[in-house]
Amino acid sequence: MITIERTFNAYLDEMHIITIILPFSYHQGRSSGFSLLTDWEEEFPVEILKSMPIEDAVKYTCRIEHEAEFGKQYWIVDEYGGKTDLQIGAVIRTSDFDEKFYYDGPLGFSYSKEKTHFRLWAPTAAKVKLKLKGALEQEAELIPMGREERGVWSCEVKGDLDRFLYSFLVCINLEWKEAVDPYAVSSAINGEYGAVVNMENTKVKKPELPPLPQPTDAIIYETHIRDFTIHPASGAAQKGLYLGAGETNTVGRDGEPTCLSYVKQLGITHIEFLPVHDFEGVDEKSPKEEYNWGYNPLHFNVPEGSYSTNPLDPYSRIRELKALIYAVHSQGLRVIMDVVYNHVYIREHSSFEKIVPGYFFRHDEYGMPSNGTGVGNDFASERLMARKFIVDSVSYWIKEYQIDGFRFDLMGILDIETMNEVRQNAELIDPSVIIIGEGWDLNTPIPDDQKASIRNQEKLPGIGQFNDWFRDSIKGSTFNLYDKGYALGNEHYYDAAKQVLAGSIGLEKKEKGIFLSPSQSVNYVESHDNHTLWDKIQVCSENADPLVQQQKHRLATAMVLLSQGIPFLHSGQEFFRTKEGNGNSYRAPDSINNLDWERKSRYLNNVEYIKGLISIRRSIPLFRLANAEMIRNSMRFLDIKKPLLGYVLTSSDQNAECSHAAVIINPLMTEEEIFLPAGDWDLIADEREAGISTIRKINTRFEMPPLSSYVLVCRR
């Protein structure tokens, strides 16, 4: 590293604007003039536009006519002959910089047995070297890289580099830093180096999947690789690993299916896995000693090593994750990947910040890193190369790992244009891909009308949003444990419950809704975040009879599955999953986070009931209408005693097996009399059982038990 004792500092903040900071300790912070000097002994004038005192220095804003060439060294000289290097400053966050250096070609490495080509986008670097290691104990080789167009550095290395480890050394502002390739596809243990691998040796043919004509056909089941199988009664051999999550024909102590085979029998269409890209928080050398959900992203295109059988082998994590995905596909199910492009674990340590300091992260009006994510950094998705990275990464996961959908963590941090580009590119590869995200409106410094948030859903027509209106209306506020929603007996949520059952599209008037389409509404009452529904009920209905608590839980889950939109279930929700009251278990032990398969056996009646509701949803298209117009034409609420809710769905398809479907919901503790429209009604779900078979015939009048939901159909 070149070292220089800076008596003052100078920064290129725009293409022709330089900021110079002279401390009071240096000539009282005064200089009547400056000049720009090059390494090749050319000198250019610097015009002082203004000066002002700041804390213990004087800040000079200056203009240069000369356009500085990035990658070359410049110096600022003051009137006393003092000299400092011109550092790359806020210029990297200007549109001029973006336009000048946007590169639409391949990055990372391109491998063949004869040679490997490495490319890195580092436009502000003066020098770049490739650090190449044949094995961890061997001495690394440093190979100079050449600067090409648009700030890309490149080199080609002859020979077969399969399994070689590599990183980049980048010199910016006279300082050398080492960084792992942001486009790395595998890594050494704990992500210390990128790894060269031959992805052709990992190819897996994707099994043919059942068609998915529309997003509302999806039923999502969220789980975590480790939680899914780590319980002693899971029946899995490779507990807590990719291979364990992909095991089939596993059974619990009761001899009944567990894990993947169980989820297949449950009837869901998509398994959503919490992050499987490389993350911090678990030491891959001793993975069982720590736990983490995975929202500490390290390398976005590298599978997490702690879920593999051998994190030392750069192929192990790739092949085993692909084996898991293949196993899920072989069951006729699809995979949704939880992705965390909104932030990195530690900004200063990230490859993005080391390679192009200040570019990939947002800064506030004072030049400080913004913190809408709450973890110290917000990814600047609106910058062209940041957007390119996200789009490239999503495309890579679809093409290489055959991922079927993505759940974007804190999507409201990202910008609308990026998310729409993600959607468009993903659709070109797989038209059935599902894109959903958390559209929370977070305090990040881009204009409100550019955020990929729920309030801007009309600009994001192909992207689903986690519907917090649904969540809080049905179960009660997530952030107030004692607040009860409609399903827990709070009549104040009656009107909201009607709207969210109709897909939150504004049944009578669009203005009463929040979405243009039911495919934008991801309906849920529980996820990995916050308290489980069961734990909330334990607090806000603590004096209730356990059976009553179960009935309230069942009612809330039934409303998820019977509403228009995309239903989302948290794994174990169907057997009253508990985390013992822990509302933020992101690094709690396995004893809190594991999926308790013995609890599934204990509450098998509820599991069977939820399984029956899923079969109803899947077999009757009226429960998964594709657009708002169909809902408005089909859905009519019944005039029944408030706060009971009842609605009838009418099919316009003359060939449909069911001409009408009705849902009645009683959140009261009392039995209530119900009158149905005239018709030949078959009851297919009552307070005890659910499924597509007729339980009994119903005439227009019947008694509705407390805390229950009924589903009835008129068959043609």
Image (cartoon, grey):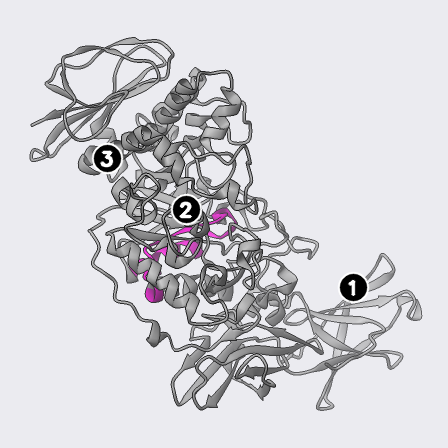
Q: Secondary structure at mark 3?
A: helix
Residue under the image location 87 percent in, 60 percent down = 56
Q: Amino acid at mark 2?
A: Thr
- Label 2 crowding class (10 Å Cα cut-off): few <14, some 14-19, many 20+? many
Can you identify the residue that label 2 sits on? Answer: 223
Q: Specify whether residue 462 is in view.
A: no
Can you identify the residue that label 1 sits on? Answer: 50
Pick whichever, 548 or 456, lies toward us: 548
Q: CA distance from mark 3 to mark 2?
A: 21 Å
Q: Secondary structure at mark 2?
A: strand
Mark positioned earlier in the residue sequence (1 or 3) = 1
Q: Would you say 568 lies left or right of 3 here?
A: left
Can you identify the residue that label 3 sits on? Answer: 617
Mark positioned earlier in the residue sequence (3 or 2) = 2
Residue under the image location 50 percent in, 24 percent down = 538
- Where residue 132 appears, x then y in whole percent? 55, 83
Answer whether labels 3 and 2 touch (C-beta < 8 Å): no
Q: Which residues are magenta?
A: 399-428
Residue under the image location 46 percent in, 72 percent down = 314
- Label 3 crowding class (10 Å Cα cut-off): few <14, some 14-19, many 20+? many
Question: Looking at the rendering, in which quadrant would you find the C terminus?
Answer: top left
| Chief SS of the magenta region | helix
- Where residue 305 appears, x then y in whole percent? 48, 63
Q: Nearer the viewer's eye, disc 1 or disc 2?
A: 2
